Amino acid sequence: MIPAIHTLSSQALRALVTGEDQAATLTRLGSAQLSKHKVLLAAIMRMTAQVESADHLRTLTGAYRLLAQIEAHDSAVVRDLLTSPQFGAWATDCVRRLSGLTAGGQQDDQWGGKSVSADLGQLAVFAATAGFRTGFPFNIEVPLRDGAVSFPALGTAYPRAATPWAWGRACLGAGGGRVCSPVSVVRVPSVGDDRAPDAGWYGVPRFVVHSGGLRLGVTLDSRDPLLDRYGTPRAELSEDDVLAWRRMLAQAWSVLAGEHATLASFVAGVVRTLVPLAPPSATRSASSTEMSSFGALGLSLPADPLTLAELLVHESHHAILGAAMDVVPMIRDGMDFVAYAPWREDPRPGSALLQGIFAHYGTTRFWRGLRGTGPHPRRLRGHVEFGRWRTLTTQTADVLAQSAILTDAGSEFLSAIRVKLAEWQDEPVPGQAASLIDDLDTEHRARWRLSHLMPDPAAIASLAAAWRGGAPPPPSQPAVGVALRPGPLPAATANARSYLLSLRHLDSEYLRHLVTSERLPIEGNATQGWIDYTDLLLVSGRHAAAAAGYLERITFGEDQGAWAGLAVASRHTGRPRVARLLYERPEVAAALCGQLRAAGDRLDPAAVLAWLAGGP
């Protein structure tokens, strides 16, 4: 198990952007992941010896020997296991934990109730998996977590145990595969075994879909604890849920392979496991990529096949860039900054910006190919998504390019993305789509600035004094410095207005239903499910009435939501200076009105805005 040395040329990095000769680059990255995992395994063996625990070494040595024997018998299966997302996740976690032990920490050998030996014992599970897959006879001790053990891409056995962490045995012989504990024995079905599985065995669903001559094979794993690492609870799957995933994936692959063969090949070269996640709320979905588990994507079941196809493209780009950055550093050591990312609610560091740029470049590329086909709702959705992410990804890429934190490789990679985005800038987007894009951009940008930027108090006090004294309006963009707000970031929420605005191009029929019922399926919403009346006016196109409602809310209290809604409404009410101010500097307007209100001044937000914007 000797790792190789890897690198990526400028041409290989460009291939990830353009799609030209991408298969060769994806193969290189797969080999690099294999070498990375071999290095991690070697580090685990070395660090375990340094801990000087015979129990730890015994746990590892037998499993390592069995894995080596099976590799000599069938190297392809062992290679597949070593490159699995579960192996990457386990090896990364083990190295992190052993680093603490070798540094003198947690010498009681316990971590969340789990012994180091149980953690290291997962190598025996990988070896047993290889044995089950190849038919190589074995008998080995394996750790049981809550009486269960998961074999990657095969299934989970539940022989049960008396304690949360215990030891059982996995074996394969003349009588077939078994997992045993002091409580029970569970048969592990072999390939081609037509008998009904034991009650204690749950196989991993596997989907293979074909379209346009392209194939995608993935597992849907909701049970393996090594894949429980996405910050969102996993979804429990019924038989109907598995069927729904199967249907949705087949339909999404038909779209992707039928209309985006290059992107489909990209996805097929990356994704091998889907981890079903519970949606955070009825109006929010979840999708995530975790860099130590390359090849696995966590996501909740989307509303439609187009969304699933988009998410497969988006998250695959995250995974590939993570693998590329394992080979070629793209951010200079010790250098970073934070900036606005139009796809997030929080300020993002440079490495995360680069990740988001590449993922949204993939999203833009996806929708660019779909916006001219299908019925009007699909074309409108494609135009909005393409036009929105084309512009916002370009803006963010420009900011990162000017930051000086990128390595030469990072600069070349980002430059290739910017070149492709520049080629798309002159492609027309219909007026209806352009207006929806501007509303979504304005609402998100205003909310972000109001949440995270704190205007200079002295400058705000000076503006307040000038207003009280009847001074002439300041320049159209008052010179007020801002800083990021200190302290923890606000938690992400299910923003009702943003959700309603997005439904105008995602599902206009459902939007009409919500507006008619005036109810929102949002748990914990401040309005207990009722759509705020001013938001209802806004999404119904009654912009002047919505602006008046938001101004009234602002008059009586601090209301970031009202400011963000007003920023959108003002785009349509014939006051371009005010609209520009609320798009570019909403935090200044909110801070000035807040200071006047706190001082007991009679507040007329419309008059203050007109004055601050430099016009009547």
Image (cartoon, helix red, strand yellow):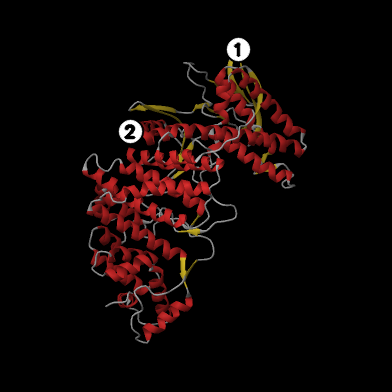
Q: Which numbered disc, 1 or 2, marks the residue closer to the eye?
A: 2
Q: Position of residue 159 (x, y in %)?
A: 59, 27
Near-viewer residue (209 or 58) = 209
Near mark 1 (Cα within 10 A), the count class, few <14, some 14-19 or many ≥20, is few
Q: Which residue is mark 2?
A: 251
Residue 418 place in picture, x, y as percent: 40, 49
What residue does disc 1 label?
A: 174
Amino acid under disc 1 = Ala
**Label 2 secondary element:** helix
Q: In front here: 58 or 611?
A: 611
**What amino acid is at disc 2?**
Gln
N-terminal-most mark, 1 or 2:
1
Asked whether the beta carbons under mark 1 and mark 2 sit within 8 Å of each other, the answer is no
Q: Residue at x 42, y 35 (%)?
A: 267
Residue 257 tag number: none
Q: Residue 535 location in percent, x, y?
A: 30, 61
